[in-house]
Amino acid sequence: MNWVHKLRLRAFALLVAGTLAAIGIASMAALPVWPVLGVAVAVVTLVVNRAASRLDSPTCLSCGASLAAQSRGEHGIICPGCGSISDTLV
């Protein structure tokens, strides 16, 4: 299991814990916030999953271009789009 999958699992665990805490608070207050909680959980899940999936493949940290086909030099990978040097962890 690589670090991206561990990051996803930790983010999911935090999301579940936050959701359970929010449900407990909403139940104690007896407010009809279930639709709001559902949308908030869905948005946070999508954002974390999208960020983690972008970390799975090598991308330029400046412009976001794919660096999968580029060879690694001494100091990192040079982006063909913007010319910045990106040091990947892969």
Image (cartoon, grey):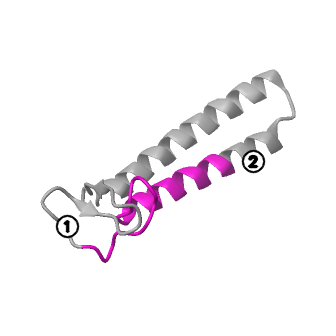
In the displayed image of the protein, which residue is found farthest to the front? 83
Q: Which residue matches tag 2?
A: 39
Residue 79's quadrant in the figure?
bottom left
Q: Which residues are magenta?
A: 42-70
> Is the residue 42 above or below the residue 65 in the image?
above
Relative horizontal placement of residue 26, taking residue 78 as reference (left or right)? right
Q: Residue 41 location in percent, x, y? A: 66, 46
Quadrant of the frame with the C terminus: bottom left
Above-or-below relation of 58 to 29: below
Say if mark 2 contacts mark 1, CB within 8 Å: no
**Residue 60: x %, y % from top left:** 38, 59
Residue 61 left/right relative to 11: left
Per the image, the residue denoted by label 1 is: 72
Other residues around mark 1 within 10 Å, as few (<14) / some (14–19) / many (≥20): some
Amino acid found under the numbered disc labelled 1: Arg
Of callouts 2 and 1, which one flags the residue occurring earlier in the amino acid sequence?
Answer: 2
Residue 24's disc is none
Q: Quadrant of residue 72?
A: bottom left
Element type where label 1 sits in the image? loop
Coordinates of residue 47 in the picture (x, y in percent): 58, 51
Q: Residues within 10 Å of mark 2 (few under 14, many from 20)?
A: few
Q: Which amino acid is tagged 2?
A: Val
> Which residue appears at 63% of the width and 38% of the height?
19
